[in-house]
Amino acid sequence: MTCDGQLSHHLSLLCPPVLSLSSPPVLMFQEVWGRSFCRTIEKLVEVVQEYPGEVEHIYSPSCVPLVRCAGCCGDENLECHPTQTSNVSMQLLKIKPGEQGQEYVEMSFVEHQTCECRIRKAVVKSERRRGRGRGRKRKERQRVKDCD
């Protein structure tokens, strides 16, 4: 190896090659819109969310992959809802903590097949009502204190 060859060899060890500093490609609007709009997508759903009455048992796995509706509708008054569903059965391990027993069980879950944007149902918040006359008595007491 010549001196020039040795020098370039040592420099290459000291100075790693410069990586391209170009930014990653930009996802175009149409693709972003298509990926984010209301559609079916596989989600991991907790078993106890689907079977809330089964909290005394432990299931393995604790969550299952289900196809569900998700995404945006482009209007805050709309939300993504399933229009067609089907059932899917899965085998899980059911563990009974108190009995030290376990068994394989088949459980049925709902999957969404098609989705659409529907009008969001308004959530009615119940207003707090004061007891009859409570506010009036406080005001009267306040007036008496102000007069003293």
Image (spheres, grey):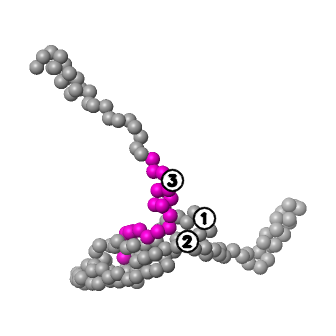
Q: Which residue is mark 3?
A: 29
Q: Nearer the viewer, mark 3 or mark 2?
A: 3
In the image, residue 54 lies at what x, y percent? 37, 82
- Secondary element at tag 2: strand
Pointers 3 and 2 in contact (C-beta within 8 Å): no
Which amino acid does the dot numbered 2 rest on? Cys
Quick check: 145 left or right of 1?
A: right
Task: From this view, report whether residue 32 is shown above or below residue 60.
Answer: above
Q: CA distance from mark 3 to mark 2?
A: 20 Å
Q: Looking at the image, which is closer to me, 66 or 96?
A: 66
**Residue at point 45% right, 47% down?**
26
- Outermost residue on the right side: it is 147
> Which residue, as the protein is rendered here, is positioned at the far left?
1
In what quadrant of the picture does the N terminus appear? top left
Crowd rating for badge 1 (residues with CA inside 10 Å; few <14, some 14–19, many 20+): few
Q: Is residue 96 visible?
A: no
- Residue at mark 1 to residue at mark 3: CA–CA distance: 17 Å
Give the x, y percent position of residue 37.
Answer: 50, 64
Helix, strand or loop at mark 3: helix
Please name the residue that numbered disc 1 is placed on. 75
The reply to whether discs 2 and 1 touch (Cβ–Cβ < 8 Å) is: yes
Q: Which residues are magenta?
A: 26-47
Q: Amino acid at mark 1?
A: Asp
| Disc 2: which residue | 117
Q: Earlier in the sequence, mark 3 or mark 2?
A: 3
Which corner quadrant holds the C terminus? Answer: bottom right
Give the number of the mark in front: 1 or 3: 3
